[in-house]
Image: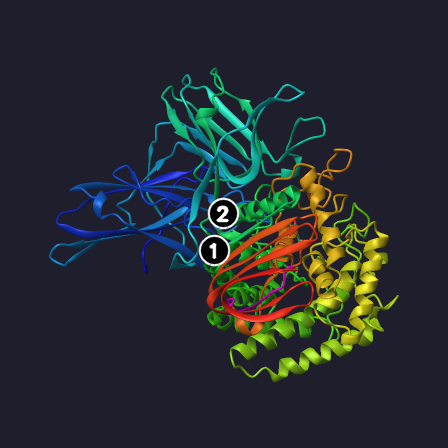
């Protein structure tokens, strides 16, 4: 699709959708394809038939650089005289969306582009493209936005409003490269609640991303008006302050006919909807469905055990992924963010890659990340960067930017496809080069602005940033990134001797600057600026935190013979905090793994099964159906943590999923056998869990690790796919190298 005229509506009413129409003849057509895109969100129809089943097309990419188009086979829909109609709403590109600006971040106008290629019986081609022969009409969607919701006025009669050529579109058009965004689960309401303050609220029983469909007949001009919520407040009343400026208001104005309505250009994150207005008819559950919308990923991982709360946690991890893998990996789907936060994506990607095949999903996003990487190698906090003024986006943070190395590496490990490393290798190296030049020390990353151990609990429950020193976090991730570049380079047979040397130097310098006998020094110089007006206190730059110890172990920063000491200290800190974690986004993903690697699996299980805040089961016991952003989003007394940063659908802490697969069930891919050509299967049974059934459909075939406790014995049933190799390691120390087949053991 090249050199095709984009067109826009001559009118540009706030939030309004428009319909672009073209009539064309088609005779003796052998086959026909329509290619369509928009700066906005579109749905297309030929002779009244909807094209395809994808929703929220053309999807979300780095709109300043590239925008996808979809191709539809329209052969069977054509008649002699045809009408193509393209409805387009403002969507991500030109509507109420964005991290800064929150409106028209990428484009002032909705605009569309289309090309219909008719191949005639005689082999000749006729092309119909968007040009001045198209007409624009007003649309029944009179208002919409990703954050604000949507208004559909069934009484509105579209009026002709002429034609306008679009302004120059800088983005190049590319065929769609990601997974399709589809309507997935259809969920019936479970309860109609009348809240203590008299409002009618429908509970769907599951927090999710999508929208609600109504099939109703009311009187003309009657309205359905809803907004939504993830939780009810302490008293059982509707609560949506945590959505901040995102109104999520859906309005349906009836015309007296029986109609089915659902938003086309917006989506919401919700479990509950409030009926602010409803026609004078009974609320009939048969006619109301919540529709979960997400990228169409193939499920590959399955886990269940004998502990209902852990199963609920796993369910919440899966639904956290469903809710936030909507074309890009988002932080949350409900409030005025819904951004591709790089840190969140990085933290969760390993678990995500075990739950679903996320290779294509991430290939698309990583391509955007590459395009948005700054010349000097910096990687921003969000991708696609949705700042009206990209210059205002100056935050380049450790652990967030590391998405550029960690995600390609994890995808390679999971699926064994070297191409993912090859495609991203330049970006990975550039990020490490950036880290090298970012601080005032070549082999440490000191200073700068970072998100830190985001939402950790050790800086006081009210702070968003944990107590761990940013310098220590940044330098630890710098070491980790250099190490990944070395390992990726070895896979690609690239010369990485410079990075190997660099990694050695970072580790040496890290030890000298931060550590004494493997443990963080009581004090090291503070370089970090205090952010004016932020809760971060410079007194909170500590080295001796759970997260610091976790990072030292995970990135192998202390000497090998000091690891035991570091792990003991970690245990001590955990125990002194009531056998609980204080870790945030940075430390949590690795804490159980480093405990298991240090022979402290019993303690790892205690953390997994802990139910006092902060813990995974705390949210489960407080009714969570997805992962919470805050360990204590709902406090012990039922009050809410706060309105500002309190999402109930943030997948980051769902990273624990990879410990369930990798340690509890024990299926871990070996580095020299990416894609599970080689793996270890080292299950860690636990009486409280009783049993685990775990299955993964890997690139090398289906792996299973099941165990159950009976009396004093544990029974293991392990399946290794043919063509793969596994080292089985049982808790009693028994080891066996096996190839494809089924293996049973009793210990
Ligand atoms: C997001 C996070 C994100 C963070 C950066 C928040 O507003 O929701 O998940 O990583 O900002 O610190």
**Label 1, label 2: how many angstroms apart (C-alpha)?**
9 Å
Residue at 61 percent across and 53 percent down: it is 657
Question: Which residue position holds label 1?
Answer: 63
The colour style of the image is rainbow
Q: Decide: few, some or many residues near mark 1? Use Cα within 10 Å; few <14, some 14-19, many ≥20.
A: many
Residue 276 figure quarter? top right
Residue 160 figure quarter? top left
588 relative to 305, above or below: below
The quadrant of the image that shows the N terminus is: bottom left
Question: Which residue position holds label 2?
Answer: 92
Q: Seen from this angle, which residue lies furthest left?
A: 122
Between 669 and 723, the one lying in front of the other is: 723
Please give the range of residues in magenta. 675-683
Residue at 63 percent across and 45 percent down: it is 306
Residue 577 spot, x, y in % from top left? 84, 51
Residue 664 spot, x, y in % from top left? 64, 56
Q: Is residue 83 magenta?
A: no
């Amino acid at each position: 699709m090249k050199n095709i005229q984009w067109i826009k509506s001559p009118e540009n009413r706030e939030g309004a959708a428009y319909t672009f129409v073209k009539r064309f003849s088609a005779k003796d057509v052998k086959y026909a394809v329509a290619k369509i895109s928009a700066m906005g969100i579109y749905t297309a129809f030929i002779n009244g038939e909807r094209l395809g089943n994808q929703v929220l097309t053309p999807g979300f990419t780095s709109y300043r650089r590239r925008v996808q188009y979809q191709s539809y086979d329209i052969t069977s829909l054509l008649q002699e005289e045809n009408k193509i109609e393209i409805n387009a709403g403002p969507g991500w590109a030109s509507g109420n969306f964005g991290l800064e600006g929150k409106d028209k971040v990428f484009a002032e106008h909705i605009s569309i582009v289309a090309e219909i290629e008719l191949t005639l019986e005689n082999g000749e081609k006729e092309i119909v493209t968007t040009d001045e022969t198209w007409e624009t009409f007003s649309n029944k969607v009179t208002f919409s936005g990703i954050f604000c919701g949507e208004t559909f006025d069934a009484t509105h009669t579209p009026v002709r409003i002429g034609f306008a050529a679009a302004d120059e579109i800088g983005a190049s058009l590319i065929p769609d490269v990601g997974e399709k965004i589809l309507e997935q689960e259809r969920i019936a309401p479970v309860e109609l609640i009348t809240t203590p303050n008299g409002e009618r609220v429908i509970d769907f029983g599951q927090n999710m991303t999508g929208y609600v469909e109504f099939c109703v007949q009311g009187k003309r001009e009657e309205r359905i008006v809803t907004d939504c919520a993830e939780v009810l407040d302490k008293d059982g009343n509707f609560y949506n302050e945590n959505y901040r400026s995102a109104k999520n208001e859906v309005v349906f104005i009836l015309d007296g006919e029986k109609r089915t309505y659902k938003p086309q250009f917006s989506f919401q994150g919700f479990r509950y909807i409030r009926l602010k207005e409803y026609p004078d008819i009974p609320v009939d559950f048969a006619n109301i469905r919540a529709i979960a919308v997400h990228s169409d990923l193939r499920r590959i991982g399955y886990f269940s055990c004998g502990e209902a709360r852990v199963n609920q946690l796993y369910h919440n991890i899966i639904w956290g992924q469903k809710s936030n893998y909507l074309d890009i990996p988002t932080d949350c789907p409900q409030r005025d963010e819904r951004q591709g936060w790089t840190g969140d994506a990085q933290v969760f990607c390993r678990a995500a890659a075990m739950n679903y095949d996320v290779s294509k999903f991430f290939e698309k996003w990583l391509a955007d990340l590459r395009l948005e990487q700054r010349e000097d190698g910096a990687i921003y906090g969000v991708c696609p960067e949705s700042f009206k003024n990209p210059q205002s986006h100056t935050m380049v943070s450790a652990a967030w930017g590391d998405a550029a190395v960690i995600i390609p590496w994890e995808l390679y490990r999971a699926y064994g496809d070297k191409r993912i490393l090859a495609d991203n290798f330049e970006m990975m190296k550039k990020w490490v080069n950036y880290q090298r030049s970012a601080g005032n020390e070549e082999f440490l990353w000191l200073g700068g602005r970072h998100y830190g151990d985001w939402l950790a609990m050790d800086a006081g429950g009210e702070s968003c940033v944990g107590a761990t020193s940013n310098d220590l976090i940044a330098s630890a991730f710098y070491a980790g990134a250099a190490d990944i570049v070395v390992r990726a380079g070895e896979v690609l047979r690239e010369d990485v001797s410079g990075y190997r040397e660099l990694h050695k130097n970072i580790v040496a310098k890290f030890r000298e600057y931060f550590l004494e006998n493997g443990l963080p020094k009581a004090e090291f110089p503070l370089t970090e600026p205090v952010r004016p007006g932020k809760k971060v206190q410079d007194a909170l730059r500590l080295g001796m935190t759970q997260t610091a110890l976790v990072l030292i172990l995970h990135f192998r920063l202390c000497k090998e013979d000091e690891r035991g000491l570091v792990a003991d200290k970690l245990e001590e800190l955990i125990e002194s905090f009531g056998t609980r974690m204080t870790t945030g986004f940075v430390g949590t993903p690795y804490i159980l793994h480093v405990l298991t690697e240090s022979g402290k699996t019993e303690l790892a299980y205690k953390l997994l099964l802990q139910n006092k805040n902060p813990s995974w089961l705390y949210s489960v016991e407080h009714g969570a159906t997805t992962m919470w952003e805050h360990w204590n989003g709902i406090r012990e007394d039922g009050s809410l943590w706060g309105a500002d940063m309190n999402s109930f659908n943030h997948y980051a802490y769902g990273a624990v999923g990879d410990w369930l697969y990798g340690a509890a069930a024990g299926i871990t891919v070996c580095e020299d056998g990416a894609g599970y050509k080689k793996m270890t299967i080292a299950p860690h049974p636990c009486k409280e869990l009783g049993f685990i059934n775990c299955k993964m459909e890997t690139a090398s075939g289906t792996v299973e690790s099941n165990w159950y406790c009976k009396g004093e014995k544990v029974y293991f049933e392990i399946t290794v796919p043919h063509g793969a190799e596994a080292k089985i390691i049982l808790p009693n120390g028994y080891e066996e190298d096996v190839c494809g087949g089924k293996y049973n053991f009793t210990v």
